[in-house]
Structure formats: C-alpha cells, structure tokens
Image (spheres, grey):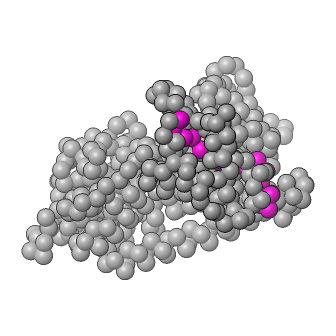
Amino acid sequence: MADASSSFDFDLIVIGSGPGGQRAAIQAAKLRKRVAVVERSAVVGGSCINIGTIPSKTLREAVLYLTGYSQRELYGAAYTVKKQITMSDLMFRVDHVIRSEREVVSHQLARNRVELIGAEASFVGPNSISVDFLDGRTPRELTAEFIVIAVGTAATRDEHIPFDGKRVFTSDDILDIGGPPRTLSVVGGGVIGTEYASIFAALGVRVTLIDKRNELLEFVDDEITDALIYEMRQNRATMRLGEEVSAIELTTDSRGDHVEIVLASGKRIVTDAALYSIGRTGATQSLDLGAVGLKADERGRLEVNEHFQTSEPSIYAVGDVIGFPSLAATSMEQGRVAASFMFGEETAMVPELFPHGVYTIPEISMVGRTEEALTEQGIPYEVGKARYREIARGQILGDERGLLKLIFDLQSHKLLGVHAIGSGATELIHIGQAVLAFKGGMDYFLNTVFNYPTLAECYKTAALDAQNRMSG
C-alpha cells in the first residue's frame, strides 16, 4: 500500500473524469491517498455530462415542457407551451445543465484535493503513464501505485456510413442538428436509439426506428416494452424491427437534400435526417495498452475481474469501457469499489439490485427479475399491477397510461422484480429496490401507509392486486 514515503508521484492516477473515474478518484482521496485525474478534454465530466446522459435527458425534459406533452391528457392533444420549437429553445436548457454539472464535478475534485491534469495519457509501464499536456507543455511521465482506466466510449462509426454532421449523425453529435427535422430515421433500437426516437417523436417529428432484432430493449419486461411501443406509435413513430440496413446514401432532388436508407429486404426509406446508433466503442485507442500487456476487444472494451482489476494487477478499469450495463450509476459504483479494494478497504456491491432507467417518453425503469427470466428458471410467481389511472396522483399529473408491475414468489410472497413505465418511473423504482435489498415481500406493501396522493400508492394497489390473484 502506498504511504508518504512512496517513490511514486501519486498513489492513484485515474484516466478520465466521467462518473466512474470521478468516483474512483474521490473514494481514494477520502482514504487520504494522493490522487490525480488525467482528462484529455478541455472540460470535465466525460461523455456523460458533455454529450451523453446529461444532454439527452435534459433534452427530454425540455421537449416534455415546451411541447406540453405531459399535460395533453388534461388540456387536449393540441396543447403546447410553445408553438414553434427550435433547437435553440431546447439547447438553452441543455447548455445550462451541462455548465452546472461541470462546475459540480470540478468543485468535488478540488475540495477533495484531487489534482486535475489536462492531458492525453498513454501507458509506459504498469505504474507509469506519459501525459501530453493540452496547454502545449513538454510531455512528461507520471507514476502511481495504481492506475484506473475510465476513458468511457464513443459512438461506433461504420466507415461505409456517410456521416456528415448535417444529415447523418451519431448520438455524439445529434444535438448539433440545425433544427428539428420533418422526418428522422433512427438505425439501432438499443437504449440510446430508442430514447432519441421517442424524444423526437414527442417533438412532432415523423420517426422511423430500424433494428435488425425482432424485439426492442430485450432486457426489459415484455409488457413494459409493448406499452412503450404503443405510446411511440401514438406519436406516429414507425417500427421497422427485424430489418437490416444495407446502405445509407445522401441524395438531393428537386425537394432538397435527403437521406436514403436501403434495407436488406429491399425497402427504401427517404428521410430528412438519420441517427446511426448501433452501440459504442471504448475510447482506448490512444492508451498504448500493448505497453502493459493489455488488449481491448473489437469494441475497445477491457476485461476485468469482480474487483474491476485487469490482468495487470496495478491497473483497473471501470465504467462504459468494460461494457454492460454501461450506466452512469453503475460506473460510479464500480469506481468506488475499485478504489476501495486496491487500498485494502472492504466493500461490496450487489449487481442484481442495480436499477435500470431508460429515459424514453414515457420513461421506463426496472430492478430485479422479469417474468421471462423467472419462467425460464422455472420459478413460480404471481404478478400485481397498478395503473396510474387508478391512482389520484396519476390523474393529477395527467398520466393515465403509466403502469407499475410487481412480481412476487408464489410460495413465500417475497418480491422478485419491479417494473414501471410512466411519469416518475425512474424515481418510483427505488422503493421496490429497497424492499428487494431487505428481502421484503407483499406484506410490506399491504401494511405500509403511503402519502396521499402520490405515485408511491401504486405499490399498495399492485400488492392488493397480486393478493387477489393468489387468493383466486
């Protein structure tokens, strides 16, 4: 373990200032370790704050507010806060939140005495990196007892796709679009693609979502996914599932510039703009991993053990660069656990209790197991449901289509899974997460008094529904 007499420059060097790197650095600093974060961008926060999670989720809130989408059940389908919504209107809110989050991260690092180094890092050895400073200073070598790779990912680009930043975009540059297009095709029905598809559809854009898989968001409960697809179709979105893209071409005709998407089935889709979202690739190319005997897979991802340690004992990796689940929340926890372990602090994480949030419109969240997984495992269960239209708070919010679904063990009545779609789903899920953590069950919900009127009441209503089903 490093101490004051250590010959290293730092006890820990973290490469990358996104959620995983930030949390690893702060955890180590709280253990009174000498920590540096090397960030190659001019701003802190990584993709999460600057081009990914924060911008897309803030865009979603801006769309919900300016379109009046959440109030249309009350005031009618034509209701809107602003008639002509521009990208400037939407980005005003996005830019404000990004600036605020950058300040929060910078302040957290500073007050924990973490040294922030603006430079691009590459490995020299298992305990040393070369840093090429952004301000043009002479590159130098830095050493540390441990190094954490938290470089995140970038949108995967196919060399055959004509990305031009004007009509064909990735999720990293879609917010640079000049204005809401009349039509948009999204290639890739993963979390990012589906989120953007639903957001633009709610904005009034005619969206086509294309994915070669036959199911959308395969890890989500089927009933929840079906509800999402229904809502997106209500917003005039078209689903092209089970369709593979053969080519994307830029075209111009008498009506202007377009994008033509050719499908393997022979279909052709003409659209004003296209978002190509087929996944993300680890940003490991410039690290010179070979210098320390590490090798990334074809998507730039690194393999780690349960402590997030690579095959080189002094080097760890956390966040999106190690793959699924690639969530900001899980990246933070990975960073905390990695830093704790390397400096001899006992800690634990419980992956089966990690919640998933998908910020579509409407939003989705889940924790625990799905019906499909339980059926495959041969575990008997019963389901209880509460629809927002049954709950006073749902009526107040103007969300009559939301749904909370609880899954209980048929014999013990223990809670096995929680699935939600609708307003506040990503917040509502945490009640179920806590009950799962303490191995609680149906009795907790039946005997608990929830504030009225709140969406939390859904838990009691769903538990009563399950009880009725079990009693026949």
Is 317 placed above or below 270 here?
Answer: below
Picture coordinates of residue 472 (x, y %)? 67, 33
Is 136 in front, or is 217?
217
Which residue is pictured at 75% across the width and 55% down the height? 391
- Find the residue positioned furthest to the top: 265
Is 391 placed above or below 300 here?
Answer: below
Quarter occupied by residue 455: bottom right
Which residue is pictured at 55% across the width and 31% down the height? 372
Span highlighted in magenta in the image:
394-410
Which residue is pictured at 90% across the width and 55% down the height? 76
Q: Is residue 176 visible?
A: no
Quarter occupied by residue 333: bottom left
Which residue is pictured at 48% across the width and 74% down the height? 104
Picture coordinates of residue 147 (x, y %)? 24, 58
Is 205 placed above or below 242 here?
Answer: below
Question: Magenta span has 400?
Answer: yes
* 235 left or right, relative to 432: right
- Find the residue positioned furthest to the bottom: 111
Picture coordinates of residue 131 (x, y %)? 28, 63
Question: Magenta span has 456?
Answer: no
Q: Is residue 332 visible?
A: yes
Is 212 in front, or is 131?
212
Quarter occupied by residue 406: top right
Give the quarter of the figure containing the N terminus: bottom left
Is 138 in front, or is 425?
425
Is 218 in front, or is 153?
218
